[in-house]
Amino acid sequence: MQSDSHERARHYRASFDLSELRALYEPAELDELIDRALAQLVGLQCALDTHLAAGGYVDAGHVLHRMTGTASFFCCSSDALAALHDAQSALWSSDPSRIEAALPHARKVLATLADALAKVLNARSAAWCAAVPARAPSR
């Protein structure tokens, strides 16, 4: 039986709002924050996969907990966060059937968020490049 948050996570779309962060950070600082968060998500994904491959479900749950913290900083979707919390709980229970049911939804949420963060950085980089006038090569 799937939980309600599993069903909602299937239809999850990246939903995060940078307006509050833009008020707190200069553009370059916000870019750095997003870049660090994206790098952290990628690195923690590797650690998660390593623990899962070794059957270290409790350790994987701790890694996912850190990933959830990063995601919650940017994500406004309660459905997405619920899917991450469900997967953490499943990992901490070390119940393979719960893990099998919950983890794919958590992975989808994290992949969607990572993709959305990368798109923000790419868009800001493209805008910056477009604003810089082209110079003739120096001799």
Image: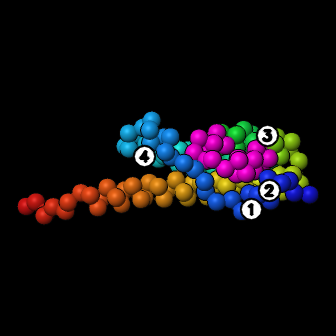
**Disc 3 and disc 4: Cα gap in Å?**
33 Å
Q: Which mark is residue 10?
A: 1
Q: Which residue is mark 4?
A: 31
- Whether pointer 1 and pointer 2 mark residues with C-beta atoms closer than 8 Å, the reply is yes
**Depth check: 85 or 49 in front?**
85
Q: Secondary structure at mark 3?
A: helix
From the viewer's perspective, is 5 left or right of 49? right
On the image, the x and y values in percent for residue 116 come to 54, 57
Q: Which residue is mark 2?
A: 6
Q: Which residues are magenta?
A: 68-88
Q: Secondary structure at mark 1?
A: helix
Task: State which mark lies toward you, 2 or 3.
Answer: 2
Name the amino acid type tagged 2: His
On the image, the x and y values in percent for residue 64 come to 70, 44
Q: Earlier in the sequence, mark 4 or mark 2?
A: 2
Q: Which residue is mark 3?
A: 58
Residue at 20%, 60% (x, y): give it. 133
Q: Secondary structure at mark 2?
A: helix
On the image, the x and y values in percent for residue 78 come to 71, 47
From the viewer's perspective, is 98 left or right of 26? right
**Disc 4 and disc 1: Cα gap in Å?**
29 Å
Name the amino acid type tagged 4: Asp
**Disc 2 and disc 3: Cα gap in Å?**
20 Å
Vertical position of residue 26 compared to residue 125: above or below:
above
Q: Secondary structure at mark 4?
A: helix
Near mark 3 (Cα within 10 A), the count class, few <14, some 14-19 or many ≥20, is some
Name the amino acid type tagged 1: Arg
Q: Earlier in the sequence, mark 3 or mark 4?
A: 4
Quarter where residue 4 is shown: bottom right
